[in-house]
Amino acid sequence: MPAAVASIPVWQLASSSSNGSRVAACPTSGLPSPSCFTSRATMGTCSLWGCNVARKSVRDGSPMPEAASMPAVTPLADLYDFICKGPLLETIGLDAEDVRRDMNEWIEMGLRLSRILGFRELMLSESEKTRVYHYYLPVYMWCKRELERHRGRFNDGDKPIPALVIGISAPQGCGKTTLVDALEYMFNYSGRTAASVSIDDFYLTAADQQKLAKENQGNLLLELRGNAGSHDLDLGTQTIKCLQNLSEGEVASVPHYDKSAYNGRGDRSDPSTWSKVTGPLQVILFEGWMLGFKPLGKAAVSSVDPQLEVVDKNLVAYQKGWFNLVDSWIIVKVDDPGWVYEWRLEAEIAMKAKGKPGMSDEQVADFVARYMPAYKAYLQTLYSEGPGNAKPDNVLKFSIDKNRNPVG
């Protein structure tokens, strides 16, 4: 466990309420009593009793108690068993003993992450607990191991170690931005400096996108942003390489794309608004809906949609310029790409609720339809073979359901 995590006792994470006020602590665990988070002031047992049992088991090797022996109202009492039953645990190469050994880290990071996500960290609902302990934390544990392997390839005294680039490929609207935000937070909290970038950050400017559309007049797949050809590959390559090799105190700018500009057609934001990243970094999280798509050739893509021929040719440059920069891969699979329609509509509604202009339902349907041929052509190959340059040991693949929860 990194020193940044190990040096902070769990009780300190939970000794204040979410609004910053001090709360009463359980006399046996030092953790807040459930009366601080619910109206059941007479409950009489610590809501983290199960976590105390987990820590005791870690110390002395005693067996975890059966769920039936735990208090009736204990939001985290079954946490150990819950984590061990997660659909991703075996996928990421962990077992119950690994969880037992690192249980304190699971608890600490889970409490921190839950609070950051706006959950009541000691009274998680079933869906919230699933999102934290079955999804975000297992993926983080896998990424942490990838970082250890990456840094282990370099000898002490070598030049500064370049940041590990983790590519995250997932369909639009499936929650990859939240996943990336969670991973970035956990890396930085644990003392492993991280930053995230999206392929969306590197879309062409509105003017260049219009030029691309004119050059491919009649091709609906290149009329708007999205498909291969609508990104500034040089800008993306330069940005990632720069972030990889930032020295101590060196600052870099990360481009930003404003999807709400021009009534949802989008445009690159003014450089004065770009985020700043200070080096050095250990991890770069690089996410996008089409990361890892491999060119398949004219015959294969034409059978899906003839308009994909130029997109397929463009993918060659993506593989050479972007995908080869990725060291480790996370592939989030979906059973039905059609879910993207509903997910995208939800995102537009949320954007408009924040006062930003967005697309109408009809515009969303038209916009997403321009991505569907690529999903149909490339997803199955990505799922079955992985990205072209990837080593199997450095690829994590798993599926999510329509509710964006992992199913293994």
Image: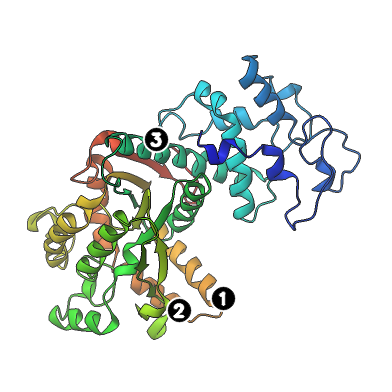
Residue at 75% in and 35% down: 74
Under tag 3, what secondary structure?
helix
Q: Is residue 41 left or right of residue 51?
A: right
Q: Amino acid at mark 3?
A: Arg
Q: Which residue corresponds to mark 3?
A: 145
Q: Is residue 47 visible?
A: yes
Against 263, is 394 above or below? above
Q: Which residue corresponds to mark 2?
A: 360
Q: Can you tell which quarter of the image residue 316 is in?
A: bottom left
Under tag 1, what secondary structure?
loop
Q: Which residue corresponds to mark 1?
A: 354
Q: Which quadrant of the figure contains the C terminus?
A: top left
Q: Is residue 324 left or right of residue 291?
A: left
Q: Are marks 2 and 1 in contact (CB under 8 Å)?
A: no
Q: Amino acid at mark 2?
A: Ser
- Percent x, y for residue 5? 56, 39
Badge 1 or badge 3: first in the primary sequence: 3
Residue at 64% in and 15% down: 60
Badge 2 or badge 3: first in the primary sequence: 3
- Percent x, y for residue 313? 11, 62
Q: Residues within 10 Å of mark 2 (few under 14, many from 20)?
A: some
Q: Residues within 10 Å of mark 3 (few under 14, many from 20)?
A: few
Under tag 2, what secondary structure?
loop
Against 266, is 95 above or below? above
Q: Outermost residue toward the front?
A: 157
- Percent x, y for residue 70? 75, 26
Q: Can you tell which quarter of the image residue 197 is in?
A: bottom left
Q: Amino acid at mark 1?
A: Lys
Q: Is residue 294 left or right of residue 150?
A: left
Against 124, is 181 above or below? below
